[in-house]
Image (cartoon, grey):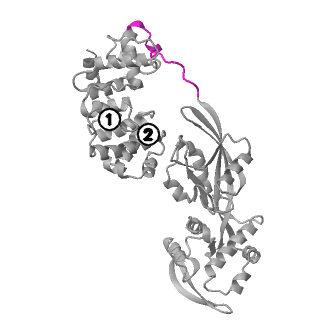
Amino acid sequence: MLSTLLLAWYDRCGRTLPFRGTRDPYRIWVSEIMLQQTRTETVGGYYERFLRRFPDVFALADAPEEDVLKCWEGLGYYSRARNLHRAAQTVVSQYDGKFPADEEALRALPGVGDYTAAAVASIAFDLPAPAMDGNLTRVLSRFHGVREDVGAPSVKRRLLSLAREDMPESRCGDFNQALMDLGATVCVPGTPDCGACPLRTLCDACAAGDAEDLPVKAAARPPRDVQMAVALITCQGRIWMAQRKEALLRSLWVYQLTEGAESLSDVEKAQRGLGISARLLGEAGRARHVFTHRIWNMTVRHYAADSLDCREGRFVTREEMNALPIPAAMRAARQWAEELLTPRVLPAEEKTLPALAAAYSESWRSSHTAHCSAAFLERHSAEYMAQKLRQHRADGRDVYGLWLAGSAAGVLVLDRKENELAALYVRPEMQGLGLGRAAVRFAVDALDSARDMKVTVLCGNEKARRLYAAFGFLHTDETRILDAERGLCKETRVRRGR
């Protein structure tokens, strides 16, 4: 009687979900793993993206674990993704890529417990296996009037036995999904909508008037607060990250984490253990992340490392960082890291001039090494370049600094009178990080677009030539400039005004 009423209601009122309407055990299994401890409305988009990336069990089994974790990024409980990967490899190696139509064999797969095995068995293979999740436990405890702690093993066994008795001979998957939908939309936690329930005339709790008191559950232990120091360690426009080895968030990429740090010296000691020497630049902010059994209270600070050398982990660019699987617990820290790794073009100030001049000197020497004598290169010291920048300003040009992760990365000089990008230099070790593109974009926006814009570049500097060409600068003519020893061949590029 229960199944007849319930299935008739399901045919009329069942939810339309992206993972419904299939008997493919692979797709059902993926959706059920995703739905563990995750809201249904959250899963839809992840499910579709995951299947586009891994359309079958063979594609999932062959993929690197890091790719699977990256595709799972944001869903949390990453052990599910690792087990999903291992289970796919088991299905391919032991069952030739075909899921076993057997509840016990399904349960033996990594990460597949009683609930998931029953869900796949019933939905994919129409086996009479009750999928006892929170929704089924709540609906059946109310329907049958079970008023003992549903967390007790004996009560769990009783509910499972009752569910098996209620299971119809066919449409077993629909029966499980109907109970899930009823629990999610009508027989909800707290106060259920008994008036809309198709089972109200048979429900013990509805008749007794205590449906909102069921199911009976023992009080859960509150999560433990943990103080966590998070260090964003940058160097040469890159940021340090490492794969976490601990069970919580294992194999995911995180910034430096020091649990229970009582002082900054604890963080710095941990950095020395990683082979990193760094200085504190300031606090980025605070964040909080709630896990099932603990809460991370995070203080995020920015450090500058002396070099890219380290014994563990590695320094990555912003592009590399975004390609790594990073847990949701790092969401706030990741946003601050994104800001640090975003190129900045800022007006030069007298207090920043020494740092900018040093970057100018280093980048100028690097770009002219093949064309100038050692003595001529030596003249272009940081002190000389500081004077040159001051002279640019005295002559009415605008001088800007290029900054990345708090470090001076280069200089940009604009001549608005001539509508010219007069100078653009980026330190060699920080090239390829988007600084040049950000500077040219800034220059194009700052100069007069109605007039021709001009820039001069060394003929042999192919990177610079491609960069300016990408912004519409076209080669017009070449000029040979002679110093005391060698000739420099430069070309003029023009971006035509509107």
Q: Quadrant of residue 45?
A: top left
Q: Is residue 396 magenta?
A: no
Residue at 63% x, 77% y is 366
Mark 2 surroundings: few (<14), some (14-19) or many (≥20) residues within 10 A: many
Q: At which x and y percent is residue 395?
A: 73, 77
Amino acid at pointer 2? Arg
Mark 1 surroundings: few (<14), some (14-19) or many (≥20) residues within 10 A: many
**Residue 368 shown left or right of residue 48 in the figure:** right
Q: At which x and y percent is residue 240?
A: 60, 55
The secondary structure type at the circle numbered 1 is helix
Range of residues picked out in magenta: 207-222
Q: Disc number at residue 106?
A: 1
In the rendered image, is residue 204 in sight?
yes
**Residue 483 shown left or right of residue 176 in the figure:** right
Q: At which x and y percent is residue 141?
A: 40, 16
| Of 478 and 434, the residue lying toward us | 434
Residue at 53% x, 41% y is 247
Q: Is residue 212 magenta?
A: yes
167 up-or-down from 430: above or below: above
Q: Disc number at residue 80?
A: 2
| Of 15 and 157, the residue lying toward us | 157
Residue at 60% x, 47% y is 333
Q: Disc number at residue 44?
A: none
Q: Main secondary structure of the magenta part?
A: loop
Q: At which x and y percent is residue 52?
A: 35, 49
Residue at 62% x, 55% y is 340
In the rendered image, is residue 15 in sight?
no
